[in-house]
Amino acid sequence: MSEPRRFRTFLAELDAELDGRRRYRQRIVAELATHFDDLVEAEDPGRTALAEALERFGTAQEIAAQFNDIHQARVQRRVRALAVLSCCLAILAAPSLLTASREHSSSVYSLASGRPDPGFGMVVVDPATGRPLGRIYGRRP
Amino acid sequence: MLKGHLELLLLSVVDSGVVHGYAIVEELRRSSAGTFDLPDGTVYPALHRLTDAGLLKARWDDTGARRRRVYALTARGRRELARRRAEWTRFEQGVHGVLALVEQ
């Protein structure tokens, strides 16, 4: 396989191996393509320079794996941030929701048991881990 | 051995005014007298990690003959570089002190 063709194949393989959105993949591929241009320009121009550049770079799979680790870490950070945000929203919204449902649940309890409803409680759970974060208690007037 | 210190070296090279990938690889090789002759493919993921961590910022530069992705330290990157540099100096002095015992 000729060097320019090997080079195009390398970039195509890299693009195929990378995770993430098309724009993100294109940015990485374009950046590495400029690196090859610099390498070839700095050494004796010609086929050998490109071959050496490809040797120095490593395989497309190896490089893609490193970028994919970074991408995965970024996705996990976003999921965690979203989970924390969801918890905060749930904690903020919980009192309003409990107040809104209080009359309904109280009358159901009273009807079923024939006794006054003693109160209510709610466990707030982290949606990412499933672990309980805390409890919210209320006492019916 | 280099693995833990690659980020410090990259931050330092970018701080010296070398801003794009190829030049960063070359500067690492040149300034270390060939000690850090890294496979070119390892530097770009490390640059992206530093960008992701908010220590570097990257943009496309269209002013030259060729479009290039250029890197610069962020304010946080400068602080981190100063911190790691101080940490490395302490470590280096510590090792030097211990090795000097043998020479005495």
Image (cartoon, coloured by chain):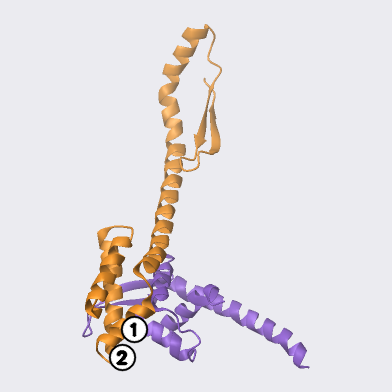
Chain colours: A orange, B purple
Residue B17 in view: no
Q: Against A128, is A25 above or below?
A: below
Quarter that holds the N terminus of chain B: bottom right
Q: Which mark, residue A43?
A: 2
- Image position of A136 with respect to B8: above or below: above
Closer-to-camera residue (A99/B85): B85
Please give the name of the residue rendered at 38% of the width and 65% of the height, measured from the top-left corner.
A67
Label 1 close to label 2 by CB (< 8 Å) = yes
Label 1 sits on residue: A52
Identify the element where label 2 is drawn: loop
Marks 1/2: CA–CA distance: 10 Å
Check the image and name the residue furthest to the front: A1
Q: Disc 2 residue type? A: Glu
What is the chain identity of the residue bearing mark 2?
A
Q: Are marks 1 and 2 on the same chain?
A: yes
Between residues A119 and A135, which one lies in front from this camera angle?
Answer: A135
Q: Is residue A5 visible?
A: yes
Left or right of A11 in this view: A131: right
Residue located 33% across and 58% down the image: A19
Which residue is more in the foreground, A131 or A12?
A12
- Please give left or right for residue B9 compared with residue A10 in the image: right
Vertical order, A132 against B41 (above or below): above
Chain assignment, label 1 = A
In percent of the image, x 39 and y 61: which residue is there?
A: A68
Q: Amino acid at mark 1?
A: Glu
Query: Sequence order check: which comes first, mark 1 or mark 2?
Result: 2
Q: In the rendering, at what x and y percent does residue B84 appear?
A: 55, 76
- Whether residue A91 is situated above or below residue A71 in the rendered picture: above
Residue B76 relative to residue A17: left or right: right
Labels in figure, total:
2
Image quadrant containing the C terminus of chain B: bottom right
